[in-house]
Structure formats: C-alpha cells, structure tokens
Amino acid sequence: MSRVDREPCYILHRRAYRESSLTIELYSLNYGRLGAVARAARSNKSSFRGITEPFVPLQASWVRRGEMATLTALDRTDRNTSRYTRNAVWCGLYINELLMRLLARDDPEPVLYHCYADSLQRLYGSEHQASILRRFELELLRAIGVAPDLVICSDNGKPVSPESYYRFDPAAGPVEAPASTSDAVSGATLLNLDQQIPLSNEQAREAKRLLRSLIDQQLDGRPLQTPMVFRRLV
C-alpha cells in the first residue's frame, strides 16, 4: 500500500459510485492521471461535499493498493470564487476530455501539468481562448511523444519560412507547397504556434485544423464528445 499526502491536483471527471460515493479521475503534478474513490462523498456530512468540481486547484491525499486509490482528504488551494464564462467552461471541458482520452494513467508530465493549470487560469475572461487551446493541444501532443517538428521542413531540413506555405504530413512534419494547396498552412502560423505567440484569426483557424488532424490521428477515428455536444447547444 502506498500513501500520498497533499498532492497538487485537479479533477478531470467524476461519476456516482454505489449509494453515496464517487469515482474521480484526478490529474496530479507528480503522479499523473489516476482513478480514485471518494467514499460517501455525496452524503450531507462529507468533507468532500462541494469541492469535487472541475477546474479547481486542489490538494489531495490518498492511499492506494492496486489500480484505484482511495481519497482520504481533499482541500482547495485557491479561494478565488470567479466564475468562468460559458465558452470558457466548454474550453475547460474540452481539454479535460483530451487528457482523459490521450494521456495514459500513472504517467507524470510536470511540464504538461503546469501548462494545464496555466491554461485554466488564462481562460478566465480571456479574448484569446483559441490560442490557449492550440497551445495546450500542442503541449499535450509533445508530452505523449507524437508532435512533429513545426519549424523544420521534413523533406529538405530547411527552416520554415514565415512567407511560405506548407502541407503537413502528420508523421513527419511540414513540406513546402503552393498556397493554393488544400489545407495549406502558412509558415507564420507554424512559427507562432511553436513559439507560443498569439495567433491572428486566420492563423488560429489554420492551427486548429492542423492540430485537430494530429489529435484525430491519435484517437483512431473515435470522436471527442465535448465539441459534438457544444455544437448541438449553440
């Protein structure tokens, strides 16, 4: 049996379990993604009541024997009561689903964790939500080892030029192509995306198309649920 105390984490997902408990998917700094049981968390007297929410920075303590942990304590570390806008909530749910679908359990990625925490913080009232999502998508692909080089041409090794256009091989990277090529991406988009420079509206559209194609390849044709539900509601 292992014991962990006051580990920084967020809740990615939760669901009812048995009569009054919850199963919770945690995303933690030093232990990665893991499943846990919060016993009696839905009872009126539970210390977990009211804090098992997404997007809230927490410290969790648990004991673990086997695949699932058992939560022993859960505390908020940020008393900020600011509320996300409707769009920011959907953005947060989207990146939570990405982590659930693409990040293996028990695989700590501290750089990605800090990117996740920063992304949630920046989503508060941000006018650049598209850039925040593209940055996180790219960091996630890098963390799982499938992000190609964005700034070097895969066919000749030359640096990507901001004045040129490229078609993108998901397995290899950019190859220079005419601007009229279907799904061509500008070099400026690739460079700004790589360097985390805010994207123009057109660059954001190109980056979204590119990164979604890379993500779809990792999902093997299984659609993400959050974008589908959001499109039905708007």
Image: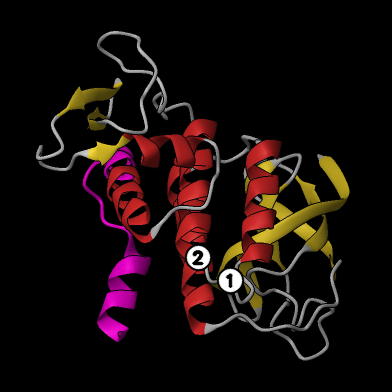
Magenta segment, prevailing SS (helix, strand or loop): helix
Image position of 25 with respect to 84: above or below: above
The residue at 54%/33% (across/down) is 143
Q: Position of residue 170 (x, y in %)?
A: 27, 29
Q: Is residue 143 magenta?
A: no
Residue 129, label in figure: 2
Chosen colour scheme: secondary structure
The residue at 72%/40% (across/down) is 31
Q: Please state, as top left, top right, bottom left or bottom right, where the C terminus lies in the image.
A: bottom left
Q: Position of residue 81 (x, y in %)?
A: 77, 83
Frontmost residue, 26 versus 142: 142
The reply to whether discs 2 and 1 touch (Cβ–Cβ < 8 Å) is: yes
Decide if residue 200 is in sight here: yes
* Number of other residues with Cα within 10 Å of mark 2, as a class: few under 14, some 14 to 19, many 20 or more: some
- According to the picture, the residue beneath numbered tag 1 turns out to be 126
Q: Which residues are magenta?
A: 213-234
